[in-house]
Amino acid sequence: MIILVSYPLSLDGTSSADNTSSSLTNEQERENDCSSSSEIPHIGNKCSSSSVEHQKFCEKSLPIKSDCKRLEMPYAEERATKWQFCEESFQNIRDGKIHKVMHTDERPFKCQYCDKSFTQKGNCRRHEMIHTGERPFKCQFCEKSFIQKVKCKIHERTHTGERPFQCQYCEKSFIQKEKCKIHERTHTGERPFKCRFCEKSFVRKSDRKIHEMTHTGERPFKCHFCDKTFIMKGHCKVHEMIHTGERVIKCQFCEKSFITKRDCRIHEMTHTDEKPFQCQFCEKSFKKETDCRIHRITHIVERPFKCQFCEKSFVTKGQCDIHEMAHTGERPFHCQFCEKSFTTKRNCKIHEMIHTGERPFKCQFCQKSFNQKGNHTRHEMIHKGERPFKCQYCEKSFIQKVKCKIHEMTHTGERYSVL
């Protein structure tokens, strides 16, 4: 059994465990006397401030001695509540009990509508509101309502333009204190959340949690329609839309809709001809960040990873390894249904879909479906008449970039090489 022992400390470091019950009673009487006297507010032992001065300093009103003493607790050199079996210590019993759950997995507060349980009553209550549809906090500027008061207040700042949290290193300001704190770490380089399994550290606690799942293999979010699992809920939800055909993000210029906001944004650039990603070395700009990044490689002189079989060199080791397999014939990824093998895991997975019949990408214009998103996208371009890749020497345009590049070689006389 795990036991939480609380030893309230006085501000001089001595334990109140040595006090007698009579002295404790006397102390309570003195507190009652102090609270009844509004003329002489209690003076804090640690900071020598009256209750009024405390209110000026930290917006806390302290009518009795016990309240002031609780406020002084964070200033004490030692914390009051200590674990018997781990190194953590806490300022009060409540925080210690919440921490205890990490060791015991105790979740005493159970939802009355589903199987979920919680460590804190407040969290359970808020969760149950999801079932009941109760959203008691209403925005004073629009129709939105919220389960939590703090969420409502943050939302209302989007109407008022209030951004009360100012970065201390630059001019940026934020709606939420936590967002400001995370931003400031980009200035300080602070990465306080360290992975338990490796040397990596992170700016945000949520990023660390996601990263640690790559070590543990935990993938808590399972698709309702197939056996796939995901680390992040958002990724699972996007994947499930492939099964349902749901496309919630609508283009503001045409009737098309998309699964993700990113895909919609890229599509909308076909209407505006916007190319927001500019190469830092030349005048070229691109619609996609990945295309810009690939293009920048052409400017980089240093290509440190050299093929041991030919003269080619590469920016990354992964690119070099895959290229060398074309020389060695190595194909480390084996199909689980037949004798075929592949140089990359992705190609192997795509091939296995031929055996399973899985074709998750469905055309929105006809009955065709595809096992690769790229093939699906190119097929829909036939319906739309989109040909985004234009020859730089003539008027021809193409659906595929590689087809455009091969065509341009008829102008330059260059010979296309697979390796």
Image (cartoon, rainbow, N blue to C red):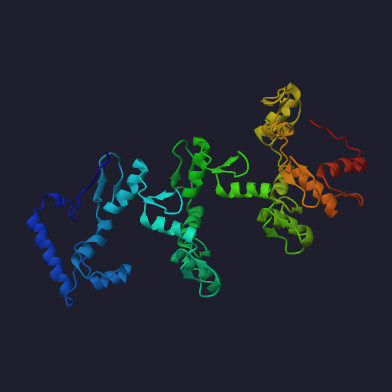
Answer left or right for 156 relative to 82: right
Q: Position of residue 54 (x, y in %)?
A: 27, 69
Q: Is residue 109 left or right of residue 71?
A: right
Q: How many marks?
A: 0
- In the rendered image, residue 373, in percent from the top left (x then y), is placed at 73, 44
In-front residue for pair 193/283: 193
Query: Which residue reaches farthest front?
Result: 113
- The quarter in which the C terminus is drawn is top right
Q: Residue at position x 22%, y 71% from top?
A: 63
Q: Residue furthest left?
A: 22
Task: Kindly identify the residue that appears in the image at 82 percent across and 45 percent down.
Answer: 400
Position above or below: 49 against 340: below
Relative side of 294 to 401, left or right: left
Above or below 190: residue 315:
above
Q: Position of residue 114 (x, y in %)?
A: 46, 51
> Where, quadrant-wise, is the N terminus in this rendering?
top left
Question: Looking at the image, can residue 164 be seen?
Answer: no
| Left or right for 400, reference 28 | right
Q: Residue 101: image x %, image y %?
A: 35, 45
Q: Does residue 163 show up?
A: yes
Closest to the observer, 304 or 350: 350
